[in-house]
Amino acid sequence: MDKIRTIIAKEWAEVFKNRMVLFTVAFLPLILTALPLGTLATMNSLGAEATSGDAPPSEFFGELCTGLSEMDCTNVYMLNIYTLMFMMLPVVIPASIASYSIVGEKTAHSLEPILATPITTLELLTGKAIAAAVPAIAATWGAFAIYVVGARFMVSDLIFGYLIAPMWLIAIFIVSPLLTLMAVSAAIMVSSRVSDPRVAEQLSAVVILPLLMLIIGQSVGFILINQMVILIMGVIVAVVDAVLFYFSVKIFQREAILTRWK
């Protein structure tokens, strides 16, 4: 554990010197928090004089808004989309950190001394994974907390109940950390095989595509996210996490990195 803690401290000391990483960790969550709150404020302001008795189009919203007015249904629908967008944070942030964790150290000639120490590959990659995952999870939870508090003053008790429904709490506090581990494992795998930090970050970002497809599907009404979808997603991501981390350790070749990367 001491070796892992040392790796984590070293990663944080070096990675956060990068301005792009700092922007991703600090400002991206703030932007993603301000966007839905601003949208909610605008929608409520424009819809203040709207008729509340109109029924929402059931062919688009399905059972999502049963018993709700058109304005309330729109609020619920937008809250769902923005909550899904919060699940992008634990994928985007660690990709920026983890992609530099190996390639960046190689470029700075600080990886070779680490590989020459008695630390095992599992300890090294575990430390790097934790160092990349913790800021992403903390930023996601913090941004979501601000979002929830802000939304509480903008929507009714009924609509707020949809926001803090068990489905979304599971998504943010359980599935999101699993997504973080998936992004970290993929980024470590990629960064251990390429020699350019920018290439590593771009390839690692591919992990976000399935989540983007869910957001787009929800936006156009192709799929309506429910608790079953979230649970299935969690199980699938947990299995993928285990597989990716196993292979990230297996394909990490210390000798090849020391001799081939020049």
Image (cartoon, rainbow, N blue to C red):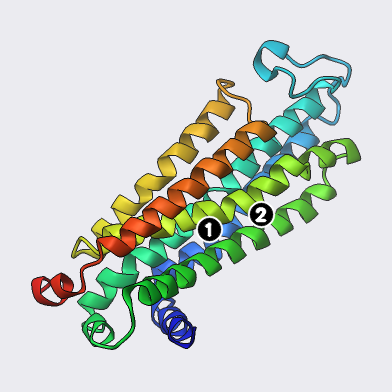
Q: CA distance from mark 2 to mark 1?
A: 19 Å
Asked whether 231 or 223 is in front, the reply is: 231
Q: In which quadrant is the C terminus drawn?
A: bottom left
Image-based side of 249 in relation to 178, left or right: left
Asked whether 199 or 230 is in front, the reply is: 230
User: Is the residue marked by circle 2 packed among few (<14), some (14-19), or many (20+) residues within 10 Å?
Assistant: some
Residue 142 is drawn in which quadrant? bottom right
Image-based side of 52 in relation to 199, left or right: right
The residue lying at 30 percent from left, 52 percent from top is 202
Vertically, is 172 above or below 103?
above
Q: Which labelled disc corresponds to residue 28?
A: 1
Q: Which one is closest to the eye, mark 2 or mark 1?
A: 2
Residue 19 is at least partly visible in this image: yes
Vertically, is 69 above or below 215?
above
Q: Tag 1: residue type?
A: Leu
**Which element carries disc 1, helix, strand or loop?**
helix
Label tally = 2
The residue lying at 30 percent from left, 87 percent from top is 118
Image-based side of 64 in relation to 258, left or right: right
**Which element carries disc 2, helix, strand or loop?**
helix
User: Is the residue marked by circle 1 packed among few (<14), some (14-19), or many (20+) residues within 10 Å?
Assistant: some
| Residue 23, position as x, y percentages in the image | 47, 66
Q: Are marks 2 and 1 in contact (CB under 8 Å)?
A: no
| Residue 146, position as x, y percentages in the image | 72, 58
The residue lying at 63 percent from left, 26 percent from top is 224
* Residue at the disc numbered 2: 173
